[in-house]
Image (spheres, rainbow, N blue to C red):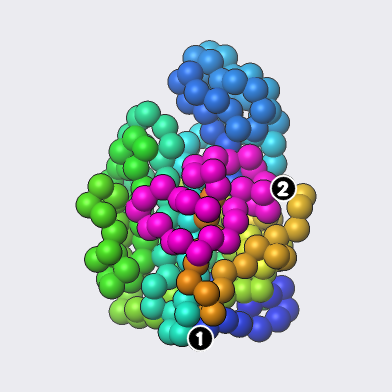
Amino acid sequence: ATGGGTTTGGGGAAPGGGTATGGGTAPGGGPATGGGTATGGGTATGGGVATGGGGGTVGVPLVINELDYDSVGVDNAEFIEIYNPTAAAVSLVGLSVALVNGANSLSYNKISLDSVGTLPANTYLVIGPPTLIATVPSSAKTLVFPGTAVTDLIQNGPADGIALVGSSGNIIDSLSYEGAATWNTGTTTIPLTEGAASTSALKDSNTVTGSLSRLPDGVDTNVNATDFKFTTTPTPGTPNVP
């Protein structure tokens, strides 16, 4: 669905901000040391989270790492991958993933992550249908899409989006694909594209097996068009490869 278009692709109807904690690196700009809060790309000192420059992480160091919304033939291998790139476990209680229809800016599915509990350090969470989940390595966390549907779970664009949502409704990370999508939450309208660059060319395929992958794996510069690439090697639950 587009901000006024139709759903396209292989039968599918339905369907980014950097964080540094401790002594890591703030993708939005400067190094993070100790803690404190840095926005726009400065240095965090004293104890908290660096939020980069535009969209992106607010207080929780997780990223949307990979998305496969269009399969060759029937859309039965779709998945969303969330990654914890830090050295500490992160609680997922109160967090959710919102899938947004760009045609009307409304969420058509919101998936609670409560049942997963915590996401260990340097670990992936894969959300998908049972047949896809069965292929994910045991080192990753998994969550089956809610409901009974096993196909056409994620809209195929153009201009649809996905958001990782915090317990207070804040956007932890977001991705808009095949164009700019916005999300009308009922109280405000949120742009899901991170960065100023267009995501019109950021597309999955229904003729070639692949996914939209964050490359390098786990790196978030708060620009969807730069951070994500189409790769012909989907890697649910393992590091992304070109």
Number of residues whose C-alpha sits closer than 10 Å to that of mark 1, classed few (under 14), some (14–19) or many (20 or more): some
Q: Is residue 183 visible?
A: no
Seen in the picture, residue 219 relative to 40 is either above or below; the reply is: below
Name the mark on residue 195.
Answer: 2
Quadrant the N terminus occupies? bottom right
Seen in the picture, residue 74 relative to 108 is either above or below; the reply is: below
Query: Which region of the structure is painted magenta?
Result: 215-242
Judging depth in this view, the residue of 46 and 139 nearest the camera is: 139
Which amino acid lies under the numbered mark 2 shown in the image of this protein? Gly
Q: Residue at x 55, y 47 (%)?
A: 215
Task: Answer left or right for 138 relative to 237.
Answer: left
Seen in the picture, residue 187 relative to 121 is either above or below; the reply is: below
Of marks 2 and 1, which one's residue comes earlier in the chain? 1
Task: Answer left or right for 158 relative to 88.
Answer: right
**Residue 20, how many percent across, how many down?**
52, 28
User: Label 1's element?
Assistant: loop
Task: Answer left or right for 11 relative to 122.
Answer: right
| Residue 73, magenta (yes or no) | no
Q: Residue at x 49, y 42 (%)?
A: 218
Q: Main secondary structure of the magenta part?
A: loop
Q: Residue at x 62, y 67 (%)?
A: 203
Q: Is residue 46 visible?
A: yes
**Residue 176, how many percent across, how many down?**
63, 60
**Residue 64, how many percent across, how many down?**
50, 51
> How far apart in space, not on screen, are marks 2 and 1 (Cα)?
30 Å
Name the mark on residue 11.
Answer: 1
| Residue 239, magenta (yes or no) | yes
Q: Residue at x 65, y 51 (%)?
A: 224
- Picture quadrant where residue 55 is located: top right
**Residue 187, how many percent across, how many down?**
63, 57
Q: Across the whole image, how many numbered discs are drawn on residues?
A: 2
Which amino acid lies under the numbered mark 1 shown in the image of this protein? Gly
